Image: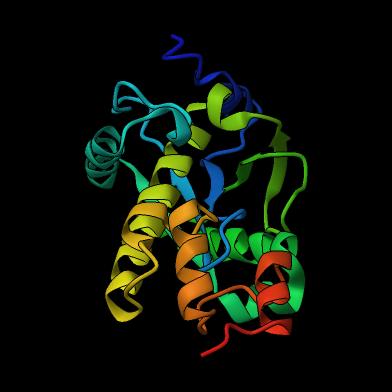
Amino acid sequence: MARQGADFANEQAAVARGLVPVCGIDEAGRGPWAGPVVAAAVILAPGNIPDGLADSKTLSKQRREALFAKLSQSATIGVGRADVDEIDAFNILGATMLAMARAVADLDIPPNHALVDGNRPPDLPCGVECLVKGDARCLSIAAASIVAKVSRDREMAALAERFPGFGWERNAGYGTAEHQAALARLGPNQMHRRSFAPIRKLLQHPVSG
């Protein structure tokens, strides 16, 4: 049965081919100027799927947190991350693939098949099926999008306490007006992605006294 546009059809098709268990994979944090990229891999329990799973970007923070709590009780979850140094070394795509592989490795149960949001498959020890806009079409990927987003937002809120003034507890490191104003005032710190053009430009022309 479809739920807000996402359904369990892709998972059921894999199961019908004997590919059990099936995980969904998605990431959060490809676009921000600061902080890690975080990926999640989620194996849903077919008889215990929370209602309302959808692309995390379409959900309120409160709804994401509530679904994250339900998924933590009902699903098998793995989380992986790639830090700022890895993003700068491997570029954001390479770091995202690394985070996804780490998320799968973090699962208590190794999957036999992975459904991945997007069109680029990470290097995994199982079959991989890419689904463009998968977070809006596939329940397992929608679940992974929620877990990745909540996990990363919590990490950025913690980093905001270590590096105050940038508003990361609100903007999660994205290039908002608040973040840009803080960069102009404070300059970049070690949590900023130096390979990203706006940060690279600031480093070439540092903030004066």
So how many labels did they put on this image?
Answer: 0
Q: Is residue 164 left or right of residue 191?
A: left
Question: x and y percent of residue 26 in the render?
Answer: 55, 45
Question: x and y percent of residue 45 in the render?
Answer: 36, 34
- Residue at horizontal 61%, vertical 55%? 30
- Residue at horizontal 51%, vertical 71%? 183
- Residue at horizontal 50%, vertical 21%? 8
Q: Quadrant of the N terminus?
A: top left
Residue 14 vertical position relative to residue 61 in the rendered view, above or below:
above
Q: Nearer the viewer, residue 92 or 187?
A: 187
- Residue at horizontal 55%, vertical 31%? 135
Q: Quadrant of residue 146?
A: top left
Question: x and y percent of residue 33 in the render?
Answer: 58, 64
Residue 132 vertical position relative to residue 102 in the rendered view, above or below:
above
Residue 201 vertical position relative to residue 179 in the rendered view, above or below:
below
Question: x and y percent of residue 110 in the render?
Answer: 52, 56
Q: Nearer the viewer, residue 108 or 29?
A: 29
Q: Is residue 154 left or right of residue 94?
A: left
